[in-house]
Amino acid sequence: MADVRRSRLGFLLAVSLVLGGCSTTTVSLREGPREYVGTDYEGVLRKWTRTEHLIALSELENFLTATATFEGWDFRWAYVARYVQDYRLTIDQRKKLLEKTLAETQQHHQFFVAIQGGERRHSDLTKPESAWIVRLIDDTGNETAPEEIVALRRPNALERTYYPYNTVWRQAFRIRFPRTTADGRPTISQRATWFGLRFAGAQGNSELVWQLDKGGQGEGTR
């Protein structure tokens, strides 16, 4: 059993090096046109995806593996370019899809999240008894609860293909956070140098972090 666990942990760490290898890459929240084509999608996906593990080495136990993609303005341009290529959309269809998906970024901050670890029934983020709570954080002290968590019980072929880390062993969710607090402050500060997701519970906590470049940090940067 110990050998099986060691092998599993080794596999998880190897995957994290592949998916999380760009974790030091800076990103920008600047908006505006992009010139992506369908073949750019995989590189953009890597840029906006982070993976972290919460492991108890003494027990050879993986409490939590969390991978998340921030589905912001830049990512959505690449997503639409790939979708248009795959589904052979017309110019008019592309325009409508792009307008719709970019408009969503003005309403909330959205992440595609896939997790595994521990008992599956305790990892359902939509349940009050979940082992984990998730928060949007930044380095200025902002900490924001989700406004909506949607469980993807049976991810379709598109979600499996466009988010390849979402394997059958994981539970997938779309998590949305408000862009502003009740008093109108951005939930990702204009002064932030990074933002991230924090998973916290009785077994510990783990943070997935997106470092912001100096020219595009925080909300309100255009």
Image: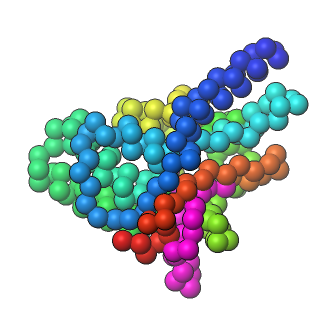
Say how many tags the image has: 0
Q: Say if 1 sits above or below 130 in the image.
A: above
Apparent side of residue 199 relative to residue 189 in the rendered image (left or right): right
Farthest residue in the left direction? 91
Residue 134 falls inside the magenta stretch: no
Apparent side of residue 56 relative to residue 82 in the rendered image (left or right): right
Percent coordinates x, y for residue 159 in the rendering:
41, 38
Percent coordinates x, y for residue 188 in the rendering:
54, 69
Residue at coordinates 58% horizontally, 29% vertically from top-left? 15
Residue at coordinates 31% horizontally, 58% vertically from top-left? 101
Q: How is the image coloured?
A: rainbow
Percent coordinates x, y for residue 129 in the rendering:
73, 51
Percent coordinates x, y for residue 25 in the rendering:
51, 48
Apparent side of residue 59 relative to residue 44 in the rendered image (left or right): right
Quadrant (top left, top right, bottom left, bottom right) of the N terminus = top right
Residue 27 shows in this picture = yes
Residue 192 falls inside the magenta stretch: yes
Q: Which residues are magenta?
A: 171-198
Farthest residue in the front direction? 214
Residue 172 shows in this picture = no
Q: Say if 115 sits above or below 126 in the image.
A: above
Farthest residue in the bottom direction? 183
Residue at coordinates 36% horizontally, 71% vertically from top-left? 222
Judge by depth and name the residue closer to the eye, 133 or 9.
9
